[in-house]
């Protein structure tokens, strides 16, 4: 038994010696380190360098695939300024001409003979009736024929052009016919002329306001009471800038007259206060008061407004 253990131990030591390196002869039979130098065998870095296999930058560089700027640059797709330039699509703003006749030269010509200017404008405008731009065509004709400036001439031609465009049927036979005037007003021909020229539009007179049955009955019953009420209401508004507007409701309420007829009675009071207060304050029936009212147009305005017959 001891011999077996000794033999086993010897065998175990022999195997251990071989496993740990063995004899010198066994070491020489392996591949010596001198046959392949350490630097030339296959360095770890040369086998497959991490950077040389498929470099992240060399495989498909982000910049080389489809650069963002090279695909379809936002500015190159449809540039806002290159597609439809604002200046090419929208025409220039049309400037409205105003106060074109309010210079000394034009005013002198108009005051000398306004009717001649209107006639010349009609002649020149009708001569350009077939043109697409009547104003542009006829303005030099009016300017040359009247001596007006180009701007003022264009205002006079403008009303003719507006009439031709909108009211030719109503005005071709008679430019003074009511139907022609009404059309010109409704289509804005007059409004455009007054804006262009700077002249003040005439105020259409109010007429025949007291000729209805109700107002006539009140006036026939007691005209003097109406006069007294109008004077009272008018004097009560003497400090107001608009005496007629202020006093008309007072007369309407105090007499039963319509608003239109009441305004006529207040109108002669307001005109008298404005123009003839000194002559009429003591006695509204005094000759000096009547004369002043006639001269200042107060009496004529009252009869036009009311439609009543003039007193003898």
Image: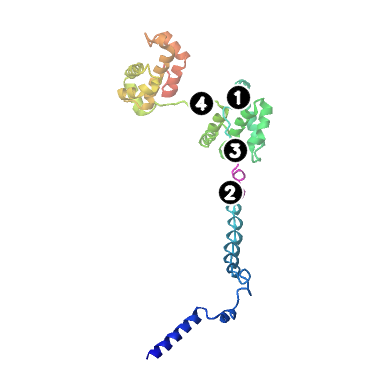
Q: Counting other residues with Cα less than 10 Å from the Cα at mark 2, is it few (<14), some (14-19), or many (20 or more)?
A: few
Give the mark nearest the N terminus, 4 or 1: 1
Which quadrant of the structure image shows residue 289? top left
**Foreground of the two, 280 or 299:** 280
In the foreground, 136 or 11: 11
- Looking at the image, residue 290 sits to the left or right of residue 155; the answer is left
Q: Earlier in the sequence, mark 3 or mark 1?
A: 1
Along the viewing direction, whichever of 126 and 304 lies nearer the viewer: 126
Q: Is 300 above or below relative to 54?
A: above
Give the mark, 2 or 3, whose residue is nearer the N terminus: 2
Q: Could you say where residue 117 lies in the image, as x and y percent from the top left? A: 63, 27
Q: Nearer the viewer, mark 2 or mark 3?
A: 2
Q: Which residue is mark 2?
A: 80
The residue identified by callout 1 is 114
First in sequence: mark 4 vs mark 3: 3
**Residue in the image at 60% along x and 39% along y:** 92
Disc sitting over residue 164 in the figure: 3
């Amino acid at each position: 038994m001891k011999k077996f253990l000794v033999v086993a131990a010897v065998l175990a030591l022999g195997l251990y010696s071989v496993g740990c390196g063995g004899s010198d002869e066994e070491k020489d039979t392996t591949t010596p380190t001198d046959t392949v130098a350490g630097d030339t065998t296959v360095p770890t870095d040369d086998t497959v360098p991490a950077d040389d296999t498929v470099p992240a930058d060399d495989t498909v560089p982000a910049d080389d695939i489809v650069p963002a700027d090279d695909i379809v640059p936002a500015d190159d797709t449809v540039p806002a300024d290159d597609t439809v330039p604002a200046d090419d699509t929208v025409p220039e703003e049309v400037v409205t001409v105003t106060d074109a006749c309010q210079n000394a030269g034009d005013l002198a010509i108009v005051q000398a003979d306004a009717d001649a200017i209107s006639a010349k404008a009609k002649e020149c405008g009708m001569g350009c009736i077939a043109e697409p731009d009547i104003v542009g065509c006829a303005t030099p004709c009016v300017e040359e024929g009247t001596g007006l400036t180009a701007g003022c001439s264009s205002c006079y031609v403008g009303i003719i052009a507006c009439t031709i465009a909108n009211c030719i049927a109503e005005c071709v036979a008679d430019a003074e016919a009511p139907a022609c005037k009404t059309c010109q007003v409704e289509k804005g021909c007059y409004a455009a002329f007054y804006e262009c020229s700077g002249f003040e539009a005439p105020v259409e007179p109010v007429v025949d306001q007291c000729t209805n049955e109700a107002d006539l009955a009140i006036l026939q019953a007691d005209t003097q009471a109406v006069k007294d009420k109008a004077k009272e209401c008018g004097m009560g508004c003497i400090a107001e800038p608009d005496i007629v507007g202020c006093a008309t409701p007072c007369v309407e309420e105090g007499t039963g007259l319509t608003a239109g007829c009441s305004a006529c009675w207040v109108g002669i009071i307001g005109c008298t206060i404005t123009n003839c207060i000194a002559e009429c304050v003591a006695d509204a029936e005094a000759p000096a008061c009547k004369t002043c009212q006639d001269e200042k147009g107060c009496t004529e305005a009252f009869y036009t407004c009311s439609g009543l017959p003039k007193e003898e």
